[in-house]
Image (cartoon, grey):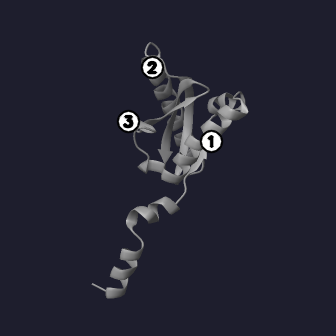
């Protein structure tokens, strides 16, 4: 192996290189409406978790993010004294696209995840239609 490249890799650990690459976080209409309705303190809290998603992307794990399976994820955080969830998916061009936002409650979680899966399917269908229209 090339000694210079070994030194270079030793100086810049892989994990630090990953932290420098940012993701774009794209708001769905629903998440945008939810965000606009927050108080300034609530927006600051949401900004912190969304910034974490932008900096860590697909490396973000529990307790901040959890996979729901099938390419669907949820951000997990408390905002304005309420446990909140924002569901999202990753796109190939380093985008995290938000889908839905909801208050976490044991009795509504299953229904909210199904609603997020429907939003994911609708987004996937819209993207496929768009690609076909562009001739890709």
Residue 34 horizontal/vertical position (percent):
66, 28
Residue 97 in view (yes/no): yes
Q: Please state if 110 lies on the left or on the right of 131 as rendered.
A: left
Give the residue at mark 1. Answer: 47
Residue 38 horizontal/vertical position (percent):
69, 29
Dot 2 or dot 3, earlier in sequence: 3
SS for dot 3? loop
Q: Is residue 61 above or below residue 32?
A: below
Dot 2 or dot 1, earlier in sequence: 1
Q: Is residue 10 above or below residue 132?
A: below
Residue drawn where x is 52% and y is 62% of the image: 20
Task: Tell me the quarter of the image containing the N terminus.
Answer: bottom left
SS for dot 1? helix
Give the residue at mark 3. Answer: 70
Q: Quick one: label 3, few (<14), some, or many (20+) residues within 10 Å? A: few
Q: Quick one: label 2, few (<14), some, or many (20+) residues within 10 Å? A: some
Q: Are marks 2 and 1 in contact (CB under 8 Å)?
A: no
Give the residue at mark 2. Answer: 109
Label 3 vs label 1, nearer the camera: 1
Residue 114, quarter of the rendered image: top left
Q: Which residue is at the far left?
A: 1
Label 2 vs label 1, nearer the camera: 1
């Amino acid at each position: 192996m090339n000694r210079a490249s070994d030194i270079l890799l030793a100086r810049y650990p892989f994990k630090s290189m990953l932290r420098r690459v940012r993701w774009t976080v794209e708001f769905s209409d629903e998440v945008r409406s939810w965000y606009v309705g927050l108080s300034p303190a609530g927006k600051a809290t949401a900004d912190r978790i969304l910034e974490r998603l932008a900096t860590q992307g697909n490396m973000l794990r529990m307790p901040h993010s959890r996979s729901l399976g099938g390419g669907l994820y949820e951000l997990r955080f408390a905002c304005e004294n309420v446990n909140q969830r924002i569901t999202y998916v990753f796109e190939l061009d380093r985008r995290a696209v938000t889908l839905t936002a909801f208050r976490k409650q044991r009795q509504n979680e299953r229904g909210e995840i199904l609603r997020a899966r429907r939003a994911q399917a609708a987004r996937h269908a819209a993207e496929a239609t768009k690609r076909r229209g562009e001739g890709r």
